[in-house]
Structures are given as C-alpha cells and as structure tokens.
Image (cartoon, rainbow, N blue to C red):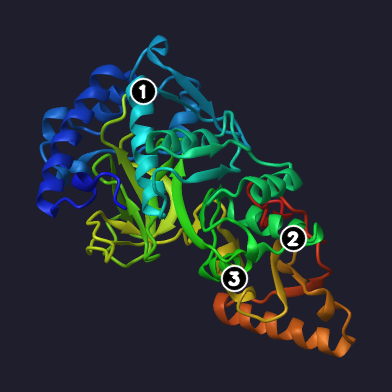
Amino acid sequence: MIWNEKMETMAAQDLKNIQSDRLKSIVKYVYDNCPAYTKKIDNHGIKPADINTIDDIKKLPFTIKEDLRDSYPFGLFSQPIKQLKEIHVSSGTTGNPTVVGYTKDDLKLWSEVMARAIACAGGVPGDMIQIAYGYGLFTGGLGFHYGALEMGLTIIPCSSGQTKRQLKIMTDLKPRILACTPSYSLYMAEEAREMGLNPRASSWEIGIFGAEPWSEAMRKEIEATWDMEATDVFGMSEIIGPGVAQECLQKNGMHIFSDVFYPEVIDLQTGKEARPGESGELVITTLTKQGIPLLRYKTRDIVSITYEKCACGRTSPRISKIKGRTDDMIIVRGINVFPSQIEHVLLSIEGTQPHYQLVVDRKTGELDELEVMVEVDEKIFSDEVKKLRALEEKIRDEIESVLGVMVKVRLVEPKTIPRSEGKAKRVVDKRTL
C-alpha cells in the first residue's frame, strides 16, 4: 500500500512547485529565527530574497556535523527550548554530541514519514511489529514507534538486547514485522539455532533494517536465513531520525520523501551535483521542520540517486543503498576502502560467515597493513590446513581484485568476532595518524 498517495505519487512538476515554496519559506524561517544561520547566510553573501525556486538551493551554504557540535547544545535551533516537546542526543565518539529537538508539529511529521516507510516495506494497518531498535536518546526505537502508532499497528516495544527474550516474544506473539539493525538480525539467527529454533519458521515476514551500511549480499543472507523480505530504511537524527527514505518491495532504491527532505548528491571530487546513477555524498535540506531545520546538510553517506518512476507507483526520487560513509571510509595506501565493499566479496564466497572485522595498522617507517578477519563455518575451520590456506588465498585474491590494495586474510572460528546488539564495529584502526 501507499500511505500518502498524493505526496508519494505526485507529478514531477507539482512536486517541484511544492519544494520551491517550502524552500523559500524555510530559508526565511531559519534566517529570522536562528542567529547561527543568519550569520552563516550573511557570510555566504546571499539573502533569503535570493531564494525563489528549488533550483536556487545551490546558492545556499552547506551545513556540516561540526556546525551542530560547535553550536552545542542549542545554537542551531530555530525555536526556543520551551517550544520543544522532545530532545534526542547522539552518542558522539569525539567532542560534543549532537543534540536535536522536535516541536509538536515535528513529531507529527516524524509519525507521517515513518508511516510512509512502514507501508513502503509492505506493512498494513493491523500488523504487529517488533521494534528491536534502541529506545531512548537514540532515535531509532521511538521513530518506528511513532510511525507504527500513526499507521495503526500493534507495537511490541522490545528495544535492543535481551536476544533470547526477543526470540521468545517472536515465537509466542508472532509479529509480522521486525525492525532492527541488519547485523543484529543475523546475531538473533545464531541465538535462535542455539535455542533449537528454525529461523525460517519464524513469524517475521518483513524486516526493516538500517542504522548501518549493509550490502546486497547481506540482504540475501538475511532473507535466506529468516525467509523474510529484507528492506532498507534510511534516516539520521540530524534530519529527523529513521523515516527519511525507505525501500519498497521492488528493492530498487530507497524512496526519499522529497516533499519534506530535499536530496542532492554531490560529487566528492568536484563538489558539484553528481549525475543520476553516479555516486556522491548525500546532502539533505529539511523543508518543513521547525525545531532544528537544516539547510544542505552533508550526511557523509555515499549514495547514487534516480528520478525514474518506480514500478510500485511512487514517483519520489530513490537513493541507492548506502555504499559507505565518508567518515568510516578508511584510506589504505592512498586507496579509499569501504567495509561494504569487502562485505560484498565475503558473502559471495561459500563457507564464510557474515561476521568480519577490518584491522588497519602501520608500523614505524612502514606502509599501512589491512587485515581482514573472517569467520568461517565450523566444518571448514576443522578442515585440513591446506584447504584453509586455499580459502584464505581465494578471499585475499577476490578482495585485492576489488580494492586494488594488498590485504592479509585471517580465518577465525565462529563467534570469534565480537557481536553487537546495535551497530556492528567493522573497522579497528590502530594507526597513529
């Protein structure tokens, strides 16, 4: 089903007219209400009156994550704190965390776009959803909760963790939809087997997975493991949380709800707009948010975009699965390496598990070294050394052909690599850079 047929199937010119009106309004709004944006726009040499159509968005300056951290906690807000109904805080690893706030209308918007997302994945009113994203300061759990309420679903607010309990709830209550990170879904499958459960016999028919990059190979692994439709959701706290974009069951890109979140894809080398189908950094402008609207926010996510109408009937632009991030991209001997590239290789090789870790190190006076730790099936790990070495060589050759950089492969036993109930830690960088 399509939750908001008017907005999600709108003709291109009608959508552009709405985007133009909303961009003009939001630029004036932040200029008048946010001193940090007033200064930023003035320093860029433009005025709100210079913005008349959506095409004028290129005149605006970019906003980056450091702008939020530098203005911590409330410097980029466009509403007084007393007008906010909810605040979320990111778990930043360095410096100040990111603080975002929602007015009453912002929460309504969040509920609306999350209802669109769940419907896009195949949910219908009356379904039961098991939400295994974290609740609290992280936006994942509550975002799904609000959307499910808006849509008329029955909610099991499990939050993350307590895996055995999650599986018992699934077995006894039989929800149709699961929402969690993709890596956690595979971790739950491991636990299910240890409990004597057959994952393919689960009640879950639809999975909505996000919060970390994952490959098509991992999708196939999840779908084969759980016998479900695995769909990708995209969002980030700075924009609204989950609900910015969502795959439909065509699984041919995530529909971005561009009447409220205007997307641009910027070429990393030139800084100009990438052509449809070309990869670049996703930049988003929030067109209707009130609490902390952002202009041309650089998400650090690498995607491509298409504007072609989808077979599902939606006309909204579609972004690709996240191909990597500019900040969890690692540079090894001058080569850009994304964990998702290596994941795709590993999951195409029989005998490997969907659990891996990249360890980057540099000894004094020497070049970078990239080691790929890969879990393999118990049976393969117990094979003769000759077979293990052959598998190591195959994995190494495949990765090197994709990356163009030498790697060391180390095969490890199942459950050697630490598991996570949230985002999987894919990279360990030991270099002193």
In x, y percent, where is residue 391? Answer: 75, 84
Residue 209 bears which disc, if any?
A: none
The residue to which callout 1 is attached is 291
The residue to which callout 2 is attached is 197
Of label 2 and label 3, which has the lower sequence position? 2
> What separation in Å lies between label 3 and label 1 (alpha carbons)?
42 Å
Question: In this view of the protein, which residue sits in the foreground, 230 or 308?
Answer: 230
Q: Residues within 10 Å of mark 3 (few under 14, many from 20)?
A: some
What residue is drawn where x is 74% and y is 74%?
A: 408
Of label 3 and label 1, which has the lower sequence position? 3
Question: Which picture quadrant has residue 332?
Answer: bottom right
The answer, for residue 267, to whether it is visible in the render is: no
In x, y percent, where is residue 254? Answer: 37, 57
- Vertical placement of 214 versus 344: above or below? above
Secondary structure, mark 2, is loop
What residue is drawn where x is 49% and y is 54%?
A: 326
Give the left or right position of residue 357, taking residue 280 as reference. right
- Vertical placement of 11 versus 69: above or below? below
What residue is drawn where x is 57% and y is 75%?
A: 403
Question: In this view of the protein, which residue sits in the foreground, 343 or 35?
Answer: 343
Amino acid type, label 1:
Gly
Give the left or right position of residue 149, taking residue 228 as reference. left
* Farthest top residue in view: 82
Q: How crowded is mark 1: few (under 14 residues within 10 Å), some or many (20 or more)?
A: many
Amino acid type, label 2:
Leu
The residue to which callout 3 is attached is 224
